[in-house]
Amino acid sequence: MPIRAILQNDPSFGPEDIANLTAAFEAAVTKFRLADRTGPLRAAIAKAIIRLAKDGERDPKKLSDGALKSLGK
């Protein structure tokens, strides 16, 4: 599941925010080498990134690292 599918209906983020969240998501997925586009871990990573962004974080590296940390990875 691409993160854009989740963000599509969320008015909380502008285009620049979505670009940062997408970059964070892709970085996290790359760290895990997740090839399965529909796996539950991808969805969990996306949701963790969005949760951190809603708390105010916008830096892609911090979002990626924070999401992985929150998932215990």
Image: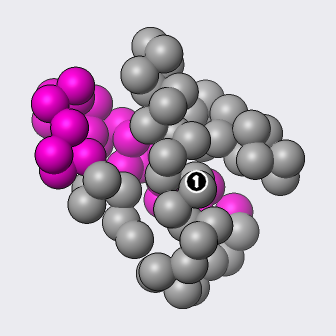
User: In the displayed image of the protein, which residue is found farthest to the right?
Assistant: 72
Q: Main structural element of the magenta stretch: helix, strand or loop?
A: helix
Does residue 40 appear in this view? yes
Element on which disc 1 rests: helix
Can residue 45 be found in the magenta stretch? no
* Residue 57 against residue 16 in the figure, above or below: above
- How packed mark 1 is, by other alpha carbons closer than 10 Å (few <14, some 14-19, many 20 or more), is many
* Residue 70 against residue 41 in the figure, above or below: above
What stretch of residues is rendered in magenta? 7-31
Q: Could you say which is closer to the camera, residue 29 or residue 7?
A: 7
71 relative to 4 in the view: left or right: right
Residue in view at x 85 percent, y 47 percent? 72
Q: In the image, residue 41 lies at what x, y percent?
A: 63, 67
Residue in view at x 58 percent, y 53 percent? 45
Residue in view at x 56 percent, y 78 percent? 39
The residue that disc 1 covers is: 45
- Image quadrant holding the N terminus, namely bottom left
Amino acid type indicated by mark 1: Ile
43 relative to 8 in the view: left or right: right
Display coloring: one colour
